[in-house]
């Protein structure tokens, strides 16, 4: 989209992608409606059971009260530490700001530096995730994990710098600024993955549909002034995609690359750890290169295969 289709509008892309999360509110509404009906049914059942126990145990109020208390307790929500609606909404708004900042800086970096530089620097998110996670107490810092992060970064570097033909790549006058944006994105990624693991812990505590729906709605309601500000400053002129093909690319990327994949990403973070998921995401680089090999006929050398093995080995090591 940014290169071949010449649609270099990172704010528009990021805003649209994140906005798709608001569709999860439909699922949250339906889920809560079913939950409400289920709770009402349980209350009716508990009430009927309590009345029956009073009738069958006349003259023994103490036994009856204990029986009713036991019945009520058996119907209580077993997940007492589940995040409330207020807590989920607050976390969603906080996450939205960090999420958007990390994604806009990564996308914007492509306007100033090469895809290679941006990808390599964004791959350092593993270092930030490990360091920030260790300080927050959600990651175990040890030599194996540090080694896995470094091996993963070297694998990414090997693929991008030596795995493909670099012909046609031109130096960019403000590449240092693009590199800084990519590095900032890596740092912000480490911040928001650690924040989620720290605040949520286990996936059973979170209403994921409400959380993602809040993220999408906060994005739509709070960040739209960015279009006017960036247009006025001359940083990103507001423009809509000019072709049906480009619209299809953007929508497919939003629905599959954000709406679906980031839901799976969140579940993975909560079920494993931020570092494991971060190194797992590095696998997108050799897989993307494999797509170029299959569909674009890009030729690669031995460093590509070495780098791919290094990234896979680093991911496996982080799980040990």
Image (tube, grey):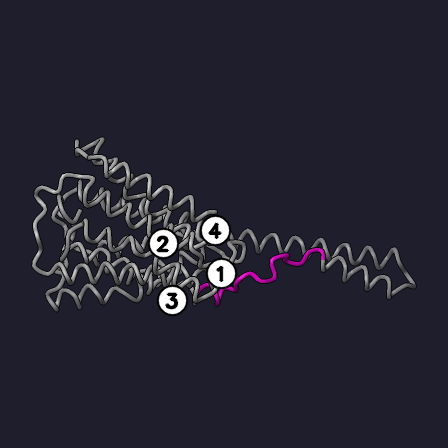
Q: Secondary structure at mark 2?
A: helix
**Earlier residue among tags 4 and 2:** 2
Tell me the crowding category of disc 3: few under 14, some 14 to 19, or many 20 or more residues within 10 angstroms, Cα based: some
The quadrant holding residue 42 is bottom right
Badge 2 is on which residue? 21
Please state the horizontal and vertical placement of residue 156, each as a whole percent of the image: 27, 47
**Earlier residue among tags 1 and 3:** 3
* Image-based side of 85 in relation to 287, left or right: right
Report, in whole angstroms, how far the alpha carbon at label 3 lies from the one at label 2: 15 Å
Query: Looking at the image, which residue is at 24% across and 35% down?
Result: 291
Badge 3 is on which residue? 94
Badge 1 is on which residue? 200
Q: Tell me, yes or no, whether the two marked residues, 1 and 3, touch with CB atoms within 8 Å.
A: no
Q: Which residues are magenta?
A: 74-89
Q: Report the number of numbered marks.
A: 4
**Earlier residue among tags 3 and 4:** 3
Tell me the crowding category of disc 1: few under 14, some 14 to 19, or many 20 or more residues within 10 angstroms, Cα based: some
Badge 4 is on which residue? 272
């Amino acid at each position: 989209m940014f290169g071949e289709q010449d649609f270099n509008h990172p704010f528009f892309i990021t805003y649209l992608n994140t906005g798709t999360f608001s569709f999860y509110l439909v699922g949250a509404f339906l889920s809560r409606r079913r939950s409400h009906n289920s709770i009402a049914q349980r209350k009716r059942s508990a009430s009927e059971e309590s009345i029956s126990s009073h009738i069958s145990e006349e003259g023994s109020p103490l036994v009856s009260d204990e029986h009713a208390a036991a019945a009520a307790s058996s119907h209580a929500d077993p997940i007492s530490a589940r995040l409330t609606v207020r807590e989920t909404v607050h976390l969603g708004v906080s996450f939205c700001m960090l999420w958007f900042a990390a994604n806009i800086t990564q996308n914007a970096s492509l306007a100033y530096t090469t895809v290679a530089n941006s990808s390599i620097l964004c791959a350092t998110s593993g270092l930030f995730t490990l360091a920030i996670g260790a300080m927050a107490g959600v990651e175990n810092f040890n030599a194996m994990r540090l080694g896995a992060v470094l091996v993963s970064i070297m694998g990414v570097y090997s693929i991008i710098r030596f795995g493909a033909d670099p012909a046609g790549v031109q130096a960019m006058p403000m590449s240092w600024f693009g590199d800084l944006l990519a590095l900032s994105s890596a740092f912000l990624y480490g911040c928001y993955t650690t924040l989620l693991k720290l605040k949520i812990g286990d996936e059973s505590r979170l209403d994921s549909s409400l959380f993602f729906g809040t993220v999408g709605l906060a994005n739509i309601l709070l960040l739209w002034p960015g279009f006017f500000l960036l247009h006025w400053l001359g940083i990103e002129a507001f423009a809509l995609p000019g072709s049906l093909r480009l619209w299809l690319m953007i929508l497919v990327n939003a629905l599959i690359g954000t709406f679906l994949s980031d839901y799976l990403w969140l579940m993975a973070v909560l079920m494993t750890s931020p570092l494991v998921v971060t190194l797992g995401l590095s696998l997108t680089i050799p897989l993307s290169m494999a797509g170029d090999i299959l569909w674009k006929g890009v030729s690669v050398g031995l460093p590509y295969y070495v780098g791919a093995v290094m990234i896979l080995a680093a991911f496996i090591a982080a799980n040990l």
